[in-house]
Image: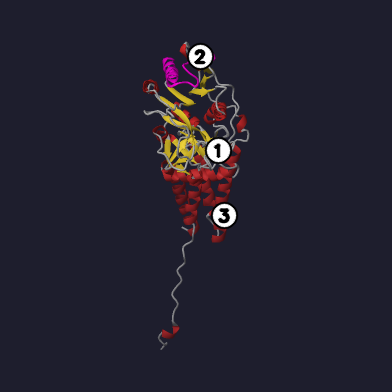
Amino acid sequence: MSWTIARRILVLLASTGAGFSVWRLAPATPEFRLLDRAAFTAVAGASCNPPLFVSGEGTRGQPWTLRTVAANGAKSKRGPAAPAVVAIGDDPERVFQSSPLSQVDYAVILKNLQRLGVKRAALGVVMAWGESDPLARAALDRQMGGFESLVTATPLTRGATSEPVPGAFLRASLPLDRVRGNAALLPVVNRLPVPGTVLGDGRELAGFTELESEAPSGALPLLARWDDRVVLAFPLVALLADRGLSVDDLDVRLGHALQLGKDGPLVPLDAFGRFAAGAAKFPPAPSIAAESLIDASAMPAGAPVVVRDDRRVADASVKRFSAALVPALQSLAASTGVSAPRPFARLSELGESLFLSGIVWFQVLLAAGGPFRRHVSLLLCAGLLVAAQFAVAGLADVWLPGLAGLAAVLAGWLVSWPPRERKPAPVDESSAPDAA
């Protein structure tokens, strides 16, 4: 058997074994999925501007899916269900005990929400009283503890001395090492600016309404650093609680994105922990006046249920937060600023096997000839494979088994080297015996 035929047989066996082994066995390993994901990100990055949001597993059931920052994110029409708003107004008929509302008044509101079947609520109002009536506070605490989840709110600021993180904020916070990126760029807070703020002493969670120590930037702050913890904005905590998620379900990558759960909304983040897209425009959320809850027989449809301060005499900062609350909730839930998911399908098993078989037989045909011609031809084969991966992904949104194809090419190339010919040892004529 000539060496050319033997080489072709070796290329056939090695290329088939390597290519089909990687194709069938490697996708089950986490290391291969990471490598395939990196390859997909590199291919997608050739035609899309970063940041890129990649999800999926690269399988036929869960193909790689790409999302990018949408140019028309502020006009997104992919809105979720609007929240249901309980509006605390000026109470012209004096239904409540006082204005601003007392602890008893809030207890009445919460009791009626429970009566109407609300299990999860978010209080987007600052509940603070300089002097606390023990009986009124006990009534408020009892009603606050009657929900499956309750989110409270307050602004945060930075002072000369740091206070301990309140329990409600601590329960809705992340350790610094859970945040990917430079956490030192996050705004720093260390205290509550309003004395006597009630956040809840049980299972309640808390989020900040604004950061008083930071200059307004026009962007919605979502994260802040308090000692060794990262605390969250009220809209973000409200969405987590309404979806039954915990802070452990958050994936935070500063300068990239924040994701609420594995399959939850993607929220573009800048390096400073702010919402990196403008608030979208959605239809007005359904609302009900707080005083109407007493006689109401049903709540407006919507989730989450949010209590909002709509008093005309409220402070400017309160009015600003109340006006932005519903758009912020809907924009975060709708992944505003991020394009629709773009899945990259896999070929059928038959299609991929034919694709790999074509690569193998192409190498077998190239296995003849001299070393230079053979190696250049195989290098050209690898280049065509990479070009096909880019072209098919960009034009047809299909992800070819490129890594398996490259494994086949590499294996075929390694076994195509000719054996070294053994040269006979030189004869030392000086040591040869003289002829007789």
Relative to 8, residue 166 above or below: above
Residue denoted by label 2: 94
Q: For the magenta stretch, what is the residue range?
A: 92-116
Q: Which mark is residue 377?
A: 3
> Mark 1 belongs to which amino acid?
Val
Q: Quadrant of residue 71?
A: top right
| Residue 236 point in image, percent of width and height | 49, 32
Question: What is the CA distance from the residue labelled 3 to the residue labelled 1?
Answer: 26 Å
Mark sitting earlier along the chain (3/1): 3
Residue 264: tell me if it is visible: no
**Left or right: where does residue 71 sit relative to residue 125?**
right
Q: How many callouts does the rendering have? A: 3
Mark sitting earlier along the chain (2/3): 2
Question: What is the CA distance from the residue labelled 2 to the residue labelled 3?
Answer: 88 Å
Is residue 113 part of the magenta span, yes or no?
yes
| Residue 89 point in image, percent of width and height | 54, 19
